[in-house]
Image: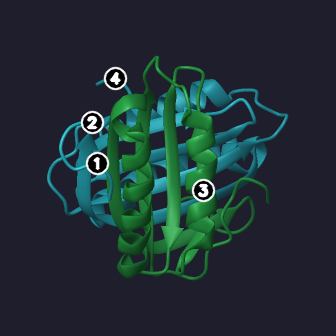
Chain colours: A green, B cyan
Amino acid sequence: MEGFSNTPEPPYYAVIFTSILGDRRDGYDDMGSALVELAERQPGYLGIETTRGADGLGITVSYWNDEESILAWKQHTQHLLAQKNGIERWYDHYELRVAKVERAYKGPTGRSLG
Amino acid sequence: MEGFSNTPEPPYYAVIFTSILGDRRDGYDDMGSALVELAERQPGYLGIETTRGADGLGITVSYWNDEESILAWKQHTQHLLAQKNGIERWYDHYELRVAKVERAYKGPTGRSLG
């Protein structure tokens, strides 16, 4: 289904990126697209789910086979972002968490929560 | 900062809930508020980050001390949702993932990504 990641059976990894955009957004949309394209070409990439509400709070979760894939992707993204000085410029605040997915469910149908 | 969860040093747990709402939304907002209030009263609750974009895709991440806290919360929410038949009625599709947060960063300032 559009917007969802068709991830395999756990375990795998999630990078949870929560952010608030600041007023300076020049180049942000282009960089977002470039980062997603970069992720899609990385070994170990499983998918991405991303949304941003009217209040400016955004949550992007990318899914990865293992930590090595995340570290490789990080090196690529940091190189790209450093060129544009992006992450320090666009965001008022962000939180990034790397987590190991242990269980997963989907619905509606079957088991409904947790 | 508003919208962010002031989580402790890892490890702790994240419940990642990605969803698309359907057309039937009666009672949805009230239930969402009730579920958040219920979470906030649960032992082991650390915080919640939630947003939904104009395209209807929503991501809610709740943070918990441990798996026991998540299981206790799940029992409460399932009871509440069963009363309202909510989760099967409101969502066209959802994915729920339980993950152990191993590393966390924030910014801007300091280390910027992953």
Outermost residue on the front side: it is A83
Q: Residue sitting at 34 percent across and 50 percent down? A: A96
Residue A13 at x, y percent in the picture: 43, 72
Q: Which residue corresponds to mark 1? A: B112
Residue at 54 percent of width and 71 percent of height: A104
Q: Which residue is mark 4?
A: B2
Can you give x and y, in whole percent of width and height, for residue B72 in the image?
A: 35, 57
Split into 4 quadrants, where in the image is the N terminus of chain A?
Answer: bottom right
Residue beneath disc 3: A36
Check disc 4 and give the amino acid type.
Glu
Mark 4 vs mark 1: give the one in front: 1
Q: Mark 2 and 1 residues: CB-CB less than 8 Å, in contact?
A: yes
On the image, numbered disc 2 is attached to which residue? B108
* Residue B76 vertical position relative to residue A112 in the rendered view, above or below: above
**Extreme residue toward the right, this view:** B23
Q: Establish whether labels 2 and 4 are both on one chain.
A: yes
Q: Name the spot of residue A91 as percent of width and height, x first.
A: 39, 31
Quarter where residue B93 is shown? bottom right
